[in-house]
Amino acid sequence: MSLDEVEYRERRAQARGLQRALEALRDDLVRRSDATMEGWEGLVRRPEFLPSARNLADYLALRRGDLVPFQAPLASLGLSSLGRAEAHVRPSIDAVLASLAMIGGEGIASYPTVETFAAGPARLAARRDALFGARREAPRSRVMVTLPTEAAFSPDLVAALIAAGADCMRINCAHDNPDVWAAMIGQVRQAAMKAGRRVPVQMDIEGPKLRVEALSESVEETGRLFEGDRFEVVETLAHDADLPQIRLSHPALMEAMVEGGAIWINDGKLRAKILKVRPGKVLAEVTSTPSKGAKIKVEKGVNLPGVDLRVPALTEVDLGHLDFVLGHADILGFSFVQTGGDLRALFAELDARSDGGTSRDWPALMLKIETPLSLRNLPGLIVEAGGRVPVGVMIARGDLAVEIGFERLSEIQEEVLWLCEAAEVPVVWATQVLEGMVKEGQASRAEMTDAAMSQRAECVMLNKGPHLVQAVTFLRDVLMRMDRHTSKKSPRLGALGLWHDL
């Protein structure tokens, strides 16, 4: 027997072994996926979302185990390593099984159709366009812009943003008021009509304020704090306190503090360890600041990394804004959503304001993922929200990085992108994109790389700043260039123009 014949037989045996192992994996996937769908029974009221929920259940079942042992052997046979199966889980496995059966000499198997593979990506693209606007000759990723207050009074600014490539606009309801919001939306609608395009508006309700509410005079006197300095978090500020004192905006923050825990202020610029917890008073010691120290200021955000704050997402302020949002917004940005209970509370409020209408009359819903609890609950949140209304997911990378740790953000945002692709749900890549350019007119190298990586999301959000129009133009150019090379996780092998003559 020749060496070629020996290798041929070994390959056939390898294929048969892989086929048996992959068949067992598929059987387990079906069992687990069916159990997950039973748990979601009744949540999906929109029939068009059922295929998405099923594929998400399949993906969760697939990724429960370690697929690495399969990947190199499958690739050595010229087959898919299942590394890009998010949008079509079962068809991907079935196609590999069909090829393994043929290589292993077990007959001609039936392959999934090309249309089966195309259905999920097509639904995702259609949902992206429905949420953020459809455009020809545009990047695959849409551009969302956070409007500054002056947009309410400047038609030229809004028109310039749309001309530069902004696809949709965002209003942060933590700032300004309904009169200003109405003026902003009027400017957007008018400019969009002149441009001949639909430019959707997202309005983000504020959610619970987790911030520094007040400072003792000694905080101002102390100035910047450095590592080793101590301060107190109190319910009531004292005039004669020995240490700087701060009061927080939400009682849940004080209630959740434990000795040995951490408290971070202003997106983690000041980090402290909790030394002692007493009724109405917490002693903390600064463990990290920038080299020039850090000031504690009113309205700066407060985080307790590693702590699940069981705080309702809807506040009284939000309830007061819902009527306006329901009547004007294309997308409702749901801040601090963490549980199915948060969703059901919002749906009940929208129901009460719909005057006999249905959920089809509601704005689409953007789930802003900014806490560890919302991350853990993300599959259920997607299914329960997507089962009622068109839904998207915003990776709120600022708060999320503080909550889960900066070192984990890159890993987690990848996993959220994969999960949402499996659920056929559009993703917004948000927070500090091209921040240097937006604020100072020039981006850092790291920001340029981040902007390029953002192309894998369906939408990229820019915050407000004096150079916002310039940043929109720059971002759109980066996204267009990246579209030549990648689509989601998949490289696109167009010709390499740089070395064309070699």
Image: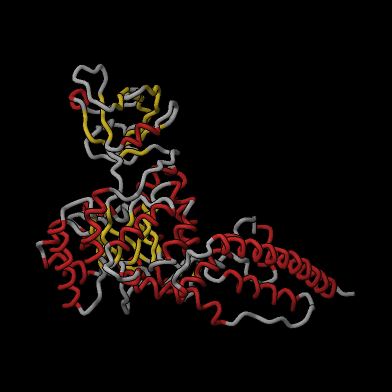
Q: Nearer the viewer, residue 26 or 50?
A: 50
In the image, taking residue 429 as reference, residue 320 lies left or right, namely: left
Instruction: State whether residue 279 is above or below residue 347.
Output: above
x and y percentages locating residue 28 in the rendered image: 68, 62
x and y percentages locating residue 92 in the rendered image: 61, 72
Q: Residue at x 45, y 39 (%)?
A: 306
Q: Nearer the viewer, residue 293 or 264?
A: 264
* Image quarter of residue 215: top left
Instruction: State whether residue 107 is above or below residue 22.
Output: below
Q: Residue at x 28, y 34 (%)?
A: 248
Q: Residue furthest right?
A: 1
Instruction: Work out whether residue 471 can be spotted.
Output: no
Q: Residue at x 38, y 42 (%)?
A: 402
Please, which colouring scheme is shown?
secondary structure
In the image, taking residue 186 as reference, residue 476 lies left or right, namely: right
x and y percentages locating residue 482 in the rendered image: 40, 67
Instruction: Work out whether residue 30 can be spotted.
Output: yes
x and y percentages locating residue 58 in the rendered image: 58, 65
* Image quarter of residue 14: bottom right
Query: Which part of the image, by quadrant, shows the N terminus?
Result: bottom right
Q: Residue at x 23, y 59 (%)?
A: 171
In the image, taking residue 362 as reference, residue 487 lies left or right, namely: right
Q: How many marks?
A: 0
* Image quarter of residue 224: top left
Q: Residue furthest front?
A: 356
Q: Nearer the viewer, residue 13 or 274?
A: 274
